[in-house]
Image (spheres, rainbow, N blue to C red):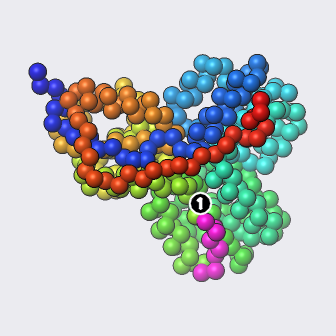
Amino acid sequence: MTRKLDGLKIVLATPRGFCAGVERAVGTLQKAIDSFDSPVYVKHEVVHNKFIIEDFKKKGVKFIEDIDLVPDNSVLIYSAHGVSKNVKEAAKQKNLKIFDATCPLVTKVHIEVHKHAKNGTDVILIGHNGHPEIEGTMGQYDSDTGNIHLIESEKDVENLEIENQDLAYVTQTTLSMDDTSKIIDFLKCKFPNIKSPAKEDICYATQNRQDAVNSIIEYCDFLIVIGSKNSSNSKRLAELAVKNSVPAVLIDHKGDLDIELLSDKKVIGITAGASAPEILFNDVLDHLISHGAEIKDFGQENKIENITFGLPKELRNL
């Protein structure tokens, strides 16, 4: 019997899925659950993945946005996206047992912003307004003589009016490399003396996953990205395909995939955002294969990641 996707080839993007920062955040939360009888609270979603959040809710985890909702003397986890100084100060007032699951690469940006604020340097932050990482990063800036400015586009650069000649930029860690480089070029043109980070802020995992999509996209006429709608790095992967004139879909799990979309395709690529667990990727892959599709290797580059981040030291010996 002919199956719906007989003859369809699948090319896998590598690396994909969990990065070291997500592994650390998820591991931190699980260790806290295992170590304490009382409910564990998390400021924001620990990582942006619907499957993971629902699984932790079943284990009794309380995800909150307002620190005032956390009872005094409770256990609180800061999400991988980081939090502002004000949040940390509010948490201290409640005598909470706190474990910081902020990705170390986000912490690096926080340190940069804090240093610039201390020196009175104005900071231009490239990122998406409303994203929790942006809220946390902007909340690191505290200066009487400088300011922090959020921009999202080249148009925003044109509209910037800054009197302070002492100027630096930082970026959100999960942006599109191509889009960000264009904005940075605009910044350097308008502010020739602007200071750059000692090392770029877009994280290795974001870059590697975008590179992996770039390495397969020429073979594909469709791309499937496994990741949640609020995952910045997952959305960037789908956008990358579209910019290369390849249609793409962002799905949480196999149930979101309409097989009919693929009926006229010859080669589809498949990847997963940095907060999507491998089990979801494998479910989608198995689903495609069960309908007749088969994996093909086009000789694309498969970069190996070996970076790991340890759990917060306060948790390691519990």
User: Left or right: where does residue 149 sit relative to residue 221?
Assistant: right
In terms of depth relative to the viewer, which is nearer, 255 or 97?
Answer: 97
The structure residue drawn at horizontal position 53% and vertical position 49%, both measured from the top left corner, is: 306
Quarter that holds the N terminus: top left
Q: Main secondary structure of the magenta part?
A: loop
User: Left or right: where does residue 207 sit relative to residue 129?
Assistant: left
The structure residue drawn at horizontal position 28% and vertical position 53%, both measured from the top left corner, is: 299
Asked whether 196 falls inside the magenta stretch, the response is: yes
Which residue occupies the extreme left position in the image?
1
Residue 254's spot in the image, x, y percent?
36, 28
Quick one: SS at disc 1? loop
Give the residue type at disc 1. Answer: Asp
Residue 97 higher or lower than 306, as above or below: above
Mark 1 surroundings within 10 Å by alpha-carbon count, few (fewer than 14), some (14 through 19), many (20 or more): many
Give the residue pinned by disc 1.
Answer: 201
User: Left or right: where does residue 97 sit relative to residue 254?
Assistant: right
Asked whether 194 falls inside the magenta stretch, the response is: yes
| Residue 91: quarter of image | top right
Which residue occupies the extreme bottom position in the image?
192
Residue 65 visible in the current orientation: no
In terms of depth relative to the viewer, which is nearer, 120 or 156?
Answer: 120
The structure residue drawn at horizontal position 43% and vertical position 47%, both measured from the top left corner, is: 15
Residue 92 visible in the current orientation: yes
| Residue 66: quarter of image | top right
Quarter that holds the C terminus: top right
Residue 252 higher or lower than 176, as above or below: above
Residue 73's spot in the image, x, y percent?
85, 27
Q: Which residues are magenta?
A: 192-199
Residue 277's spot in the image, x, y percent?
49, 34
The structure residue drawn at horizontal position 59% and vertical position 51%, both measured from the top left corner, is: 129
Residue 37 higher or lower than 203, as above or below: above
User: Left or right: where does residue 227 sit relative to residue 1?
Assistant: right
